[in-house]
Image (tube, coloured by chain):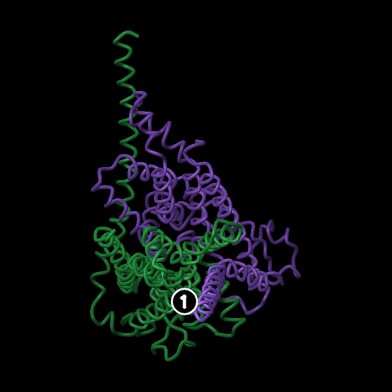
Amino acid sequence: MNGKTFESSMRSRYFKQRLFFGAVRLSALVITLALLGILAYILDNGFRAVTWEFITQPPTDSMTKGGIMPAIVGTLYLTVGAILVALPLGVVSAIFLTEYAKQGALTRIIRIGVNCLAGVPSVVFGLFGLGFFVVFLKFGSSILAGALTLGILILPTIIGAAEEALKAVPQTFREASLALGVSKWNTIFRIVLPSALPGILTGAILGVGRAAGETAPIMFTAAAFFTAVLPKSIFDEVMALPYHIYVLATAGTHIEETRPLQYGTVLVLIALVLGIDLIAIIMRSMFRRNKRW
Amino acid sequence: MKTRKNILTKRTEEIAIRNLFGFFAFLSVLLLGLILVFLFREGLPLFKQISVADFLFGTAWYPTYDPPEYGIWPLIVGSLVVTFFACLIAVPLGFLSAVYIAEIAPAGIKEILKSVIELLAGLPSVVLGFFGMVIVGPWLQETFDLPTGLNIANAAVMLAIMAIPTISSLSEDALYAVPREFKEASYALGATRYETIIRVVVPAALSGISTAVILGMARAIGETMVVLMVAGGAAAVPGGIFDAVRPMTASIAAEMGEAPFRSGHYHALFATGIVLFVITLAFNLIADTISNRFRETGSGTL
């Protein structure tokens, strides 16, 4: 091979590399800008609308003025309810999958089940909640029905996070405990679970963020168009932030007029959801750094 | 004697706990079945009125007319079309960003980008729908001089933003799983980084990347609020990317509130839910099969 063609072939190979690396960097940049653009736009427009009154007052004048307090409270109730359903179930499932289950048909079926549950569209969860909790169990459109529906929706997220946290606990911990004659259950409860707790909590927090932002599952199961009063029992309907955004942005004759309210509500929801996510992300990196093993 | 009894009760206790936990773990499977049962319970009565073929392939969706027509073909096409165009955007962006994060980016940028992807995944869909309505819609309308900015193009862009995190983070995991030796062997043969990535790393991670793309598509096809708010809502088979469509999810979400309890319309919406459930279930099972086969091969057989 003479030197010249080798050189030009190297040049073209590195040219291709530069081209590819350029495309790869560009795609990362586009994604980052998309996120920043959306956040900046919402922040810029939302800040003007968000005041103390906005957060603490109910809507007035057929939802063209006033605040969003009932929607904030409703979202909190639904989200807390969802996590109360999903966290115990998810942790127990994860313990079974990581600590007890052997490779086999049953484990395989459970895994496929969890994966498929994670892939069910949110609106189908809404239909299920309507058919099962609202109609069949006669809960009506209520906090209870909405929280249960959301709880099932975030169950796979919680299972996944808890499994990962449990797997990260070194095998030697279990062996040391078992070698001391501690039963399997006590080993899990006293040794494995406490070590995995930070990871499990991080997963739970991510689940909360997910539940707080979902709209479709609560549309037919819990969300009210408008209620001035706060719910008195778990069988009451509630307003919810995501549904409130949808209603303000699409229904009625005051869509343009209520834009500031819409921006404000979007900002509050984003602050809530991304704030929760950010806490989880920071917690996770802190635990990774301070790991004792 | 007493210790033996203790050991025995302890053992039964252990078995009881194991079985109890197994039951709760199995609950996910039961719930999946329960979802199907209740979709069928509320959806099947529709087929006393019309045939399955007329429902799936009928081109007229006029559920409130008299007599009503329950053909969901335009809705199915709507779902597929927005998903297809969303993937045209999301697959390259998601894949390339994953390559950047896994193979090229310096450590600091990598951490930042991973957080960006995670935050993007955390954006509630109603917020993206809202953004599509107030920003992308008017911009499309003005730029291309359209009657409405709420159309396939808008929905595709916003759906792509929803699908990118899924595709990117799962592809990234697949790229990480490629054994280091593969890369080292490739470098040792004199390949450039680009050649190593394209000819060695990506092919080795291909099944994981395919899984990522399929799950991204499943996410897009099942997404509700974005298409409900920005796809335009016309229940007709579209002729171009600036036409409005009404995907299945949007139809269910928009009409369930108005459909009288257990009317034909109500049953038709649940039947649409069955179709949606079956499509996404198929996507997930395919993804599961691919990723499972991948796990069974591993570095020795690649």
Q: How many numbered dots are placed on residues in this image?
A: 1
Q: In the displayed image of the protein, which residue is found farthest to the front?
A: B1
Give left or right: position of A260 versus A130. Answer: left
The chain containing the residue under callout 1 comes to: A
| Residue A202 percent coordinates (x, y) | 34, 66
| Residue B122 percent coordinates (x, y) | 37, 62
Give left or right: position of A10 versus B87. Answer: left
Residue occupying the point 26% across, 65% down: A43
- Pick whichever, B285 or A178, lies toward us: A178
Residue occupying the point 43% across, 45% down: B174
Q: Residue beneath label 1, please?
A: A85
Determine whether the residue tagged by mark 1 lies in a helix, strand or loop.
Answer: helix
**Would residue B246 be seen by someone viewing this image from the given angle?**
no
| Residue A167 percent coordinates (x, y) | 41, 59
Residue B273, placed above or below residue B80: below
Give left or right: position of B247 versus A290. Answer: right
Instruction: Identify the amino acid type marked 1.
Output: Val
- Chain coloured green: A
Q: In the displayed image of the protein, which residue is found farthest to the bottom?
A: A232
